[in-house]
Amino acid sequence: MKNTTVTYKEIFQLSLPIMAGSAIENLTTIINIIFLGRVGAVALGAVAVGGIFYLALIMLGFGFGIGTQIIVSRRFGEKKYEDIGNTLHHAASFLLPLAIILLVLVQTLGNNFFQSFLKSHDVCTGVKDFMHFRIWGILFAFTNILFRAFYIGIQKTRVIGYCSLIIALFNIFFDYTLIFGNFGLPKWELQVQACLQ
């Protein structure tokens, strides 16, 4: 087997776009909170509870995506490019039905679940409204997990950094325009956060 030396510079070049993408996502969350904090405490509390719940659901797919990424990397290193496609096909065959199952469960059982542990009626109503819109994002999030596994696996991490930046810019624009109803657009407040986060 051939010995190859990997330098710190190469590792940094691969990991920098991933780190930047994660930093941009966190910055976007902070900006969302700043915008939504001006709406009110109930809306902020509803998004906080709903957001954590949604993140927990995303982690189910994220763990599977890391496994997919490892296999894609191995196949890329072995130059078995056709197997990369098969790996992604199998991953999609698991992740997308899982996303649909989670979506249906939250839409049908979510109200009872949130009522069982939230004491504030206003926050509970806000969480229900938030999750009614937000849960549809799980289909796109799980698809994003597949693309992320692919691009990291084939060492094209810049794509992730660019996409994160574009998403953040759109998010900030729609936060500003739709939460407050600027530029003649409707004032959606809580629903905007559900769609954009």
Image: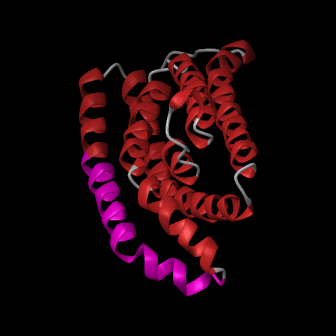
Q: Residue furthest front?
A: 184
Position of residue 53 measured from the top left corner of the image (x, y, whole percent): 56, 64
Prevailing SS of the magenta stretch: helix
Which residue is at a point 45% across and 37% down the rendered structure image?
A: 69
Magenta stretch contains residue 30: no
Which residue is at a point 44% across and 22% down the rendered structure image?
A: 154
Position of residue 41 measured from the top left corner of the image (x, y, whole percent): 74, 62
Q: Nearer the viewer, residue 114 or 7?
A: 114
Q: Is residue 53 above or below residue 86?
A: below
50 to the left or right of 132: right
Q: Nearer the viewer, residue 166 or 92?
A: 166
Quadrant position of residue 116: bottom right
**How many numbered marks have been drawn onto this rendered protein structure?**
0
Structure colour scheme: secondary structure
Give the residues in magenta. 93-119
Which residue is at a point 38% across and 52% down the rendered structure image?
A: 136
Position of residue 7 measured from the top left corner of the image (x, y, whole percent): 70, 15
Position of residue 76 measured from the top left corner of the image (x, y, whole percent): 39, 23
Which residue is at a point 53% across and 83% down the rendered structure image?
A: 115
181 to the left or right of 111: right
Q: Is residue 94 above or below residue 20?
A: below
Q: Is residue 107 above or below residue 153?
A: below
97 to the left or right of 65: left
- Position of the C terminus, as image quadrant, is top right
145 to the left or right of 192: left
Q: Is residue 105 above or below residue 61?
A: below
Q: Nearer the viewer, residue 116 or 156?
A: 116
Magenta stretch contains residue 94: yes
